[in-house]
Image: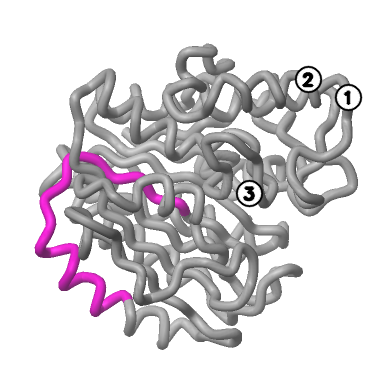
Amino acid sequence: MIYVALDDLLSLYSFPEHPFNKQRYFAFKDALEKKGLIRYLKKVESREAKRDELLLFHTKEYIEFVKNKDKEGGYLDYGDTPAFEGIFRASSIIVGTTLNCIDKAIQENTKVFTPVGGLHHAYRDRASGFCVFNDICISINYLRKKYGIEKILYFDIDAHHGDGVYYSFIEDQDLYIVDFHQRGIFPGTGSKTEKGIGKASGTKLNIELTAGTTDEIFLGELKKIEEFLNTIKIEFILFQAGCDSLADDPITFLNLTERVHQGVTGILIEIADKQAKGRMVVFGGGGYSLSNIKKGWIAVIEELLKYEKVKERIF
């Protein structure tokens, strides 16, 4: 059975008058309902992360900083991520919900989608790019501490480089990273020459896309990546399926369609089933066009359900 985190508490992670707002969550929920897909999905409950869970990645000083900004207001970084009353709780709910998704994937050897997760820009001690707490990095350490899972694949197709994840684990030889992103936009990192350092050299791939990149170019690069994926052995998959890589996103410049989400999801399903007992968590990530959210995230859900149809004949 496929699971989805569909709790309106997730909509609390919403910056006022900002592209990252609660309408993204509700657009996804509305699309699920209108397409009649909810009846085929089981729900994962939301919860606030505990302090010791936040400490799996973030420093205690930074956690206190976010708490204080909850009351003070202002910005958590240099201008992209505004503080608002309730931001600490809202950010903690994203993390707690993601960890519930991890638990469910492990317990039932299945795949789980969380629409508001995937905050890949935050670092241990600072916010960045609309991201307060990095639920992906916390998840990596959570998998290792609670379940003893070491070898993890992190696959990211958000238009922005997942710098908070990449540079935090740049020397980690057991975290494999494949990151597709547009060159020359925020955060300006992720050169194709960066492949990890030390013992982790060669465990990470950055695929830079130029403005206007089409499906054909992306899927051609994906074919090459399959060769890399066939050489690694992993126990769990984390997939950041940002929709800001689709055409007409207001802050990016790629020309992709939801075909890329379908293609990547299909490949990762196969790898999850062959190597990771079927275990994968998918994060919604970025995306600031509501119509694209409905296309991209729904394409992922439909691909997951298509797999289930073959496996269990649920339709």
- Residue 226 lies left or right of residue 256; in this view the side is left
Could you tell me if the residues under marks 2 and 1 are in contact, i.e. CB atoms within 8 Å? yes
Instruction: Assign the N terminus to one quadrant of the image.
Output: top left
Query: Alpha-carbon neighbours of circle 2 within 10 Å: few (<14), some, or many (≥20)?
Result: few
Between the residue at mark 2 and the residue at mark 3, the CA separation in whole angstroms equals 36 Å
Q: Nearer the viewer, residue 7 or 132?
A: 132
- Residue 234 lies left or right of residue 94; in this view the side is left
Residue 130: x and y in percent read 69, 47
* Dot 1 amino acid type: Glu
Q: Which residues are magenta?
A: 222-240
Q: Which residue is mark 1?
A: 72
- At x 72% / y 62%, what residue is drawn? 289
Q: Is residue 8 visible?
A: no
Q: Which residue is mark 3?
A: 31
Measured along the vertical axis of the image, is residue 253 above or below residue 301?
Answer: below
Q: Earlier in the sequence, mark 1 or mark 3?
A: 3
How was this image coloured?
one colour
- At x 36% / y 28%, what residue is drawn? 102
Residue 140: x and y in percent read 34, 35
